[in-house]
Amino acid sequence: MGLPEFTLLAPIFDYPEAGYGEKIPPLLEMVAKLYPEAKGELDLFVKALGEGSIEGEKLDAIQELYTRTFDIQPITTLDVGFVLFGDDYKRGEILSNLNKEHIASGNPCGNELADHLPNLLRLIALKGKDDFVLELVDMILAPALRAMIREFDPERVEKKNKYYKKQYKTLIETPDVDSIAYRHALRACYQILCSEFELPEVDMAEASETSDFLKSIRTENQTEDIKGS
C-alpha cells in the first residue's frame, strides 16, 4: 500500500511553473489533517513566498529564488545522493539502485536524476513502507534533509553570499519573497517523514564546524590571499 499523500508534498520542490500556487492549498489541507506538527513550517513557507497569487512577476521571483536556492550558486541541492556523497562512487551505486526502483514502480523521473527529492517523494507515494523505502528514508533521505536544512543557517548563508559576491560581483535578487523560504519547506518535509516513519527527533541545529562547501571556500580564499600578498 502506497502513501498517496506524498504526491501532494513532492510538487512544492518541483521547479515553479504556471499553476504552482494551485498545488499548495491541497497540501496545506492534507498536512493540517495528517501531520499537524509540520503545519507551522509549511505556513511559514507560504508566508515567505509573499502575498497574492503566484503568477506574473511573482512567479518569476519564485522561479529565481528556486534557481538560486537549488541550482545556480546554490544554498543546497535537491539531489540527496550528492548531498551525502558528492561525486563519490557511492552516489553512483545509489543512483543505479534508485533507477531500478523508479522503473519497477512506474515512476518517471523526467529530466532529473533518480535521487532528486521530488522523485524520491513520488517513489515513496507509490511504494509505501516496504523494506526498500524504510531503508531509503532512514539511511539516505532523512540524513540528507538534515544536512540540507543546516545549510540554511544564517551564518552559513552569509558566508556563501560573500563568496558569491566576490566571485561573481553580483547576487541574484528575489524581490517580494524571503530568500530562505525553502528552508521551511524542507523542515516541513523532514517533520512529515519523522511522523510517518517514526524517526528519532534530531536537533537539526547540531552540525560539524562547517560544511565541505564552506571548507572549500575557506581554502580558496586563503590561497587567493597568499597569491595576492
Image: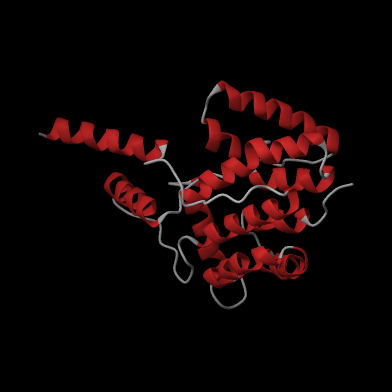
Q: Is residue 186 left or right of residue 130?
A: left
Residue 207 or residue 158, whichever sits in front: 207
**For residue 114, which quarter of the picture?**
top right
Position in image of residue 168 (x %, y %): 32, 47
Q: 219 or 192: which is nearer to us?
A: 192
In the image: residue 80, left or right of residue 178: right
- Between 102 and 59, the one lying in front of the other is 102
In the rendered image, residue 5, in percent from the top left (x then y), is placed at: 79, 57
Q: Give the residue displayed 59% in from the left and 39% down from the top.
A: 80
**Direction left: furthest residue:** 229
- Does residue 103 show up? yes
In this view, the residue in front, 98 or 195, is: 195
Q: How many marks?
A: 0
Does 206 appear above or below 91?
below
Q: Position of residue 52 (x, y in %)?
A: 59, 78
Relative to 108, residue 196 above or below: below
Residue 165: image x %, image y %?
30, 51
Name the residue: 36% across, 48% down: 160
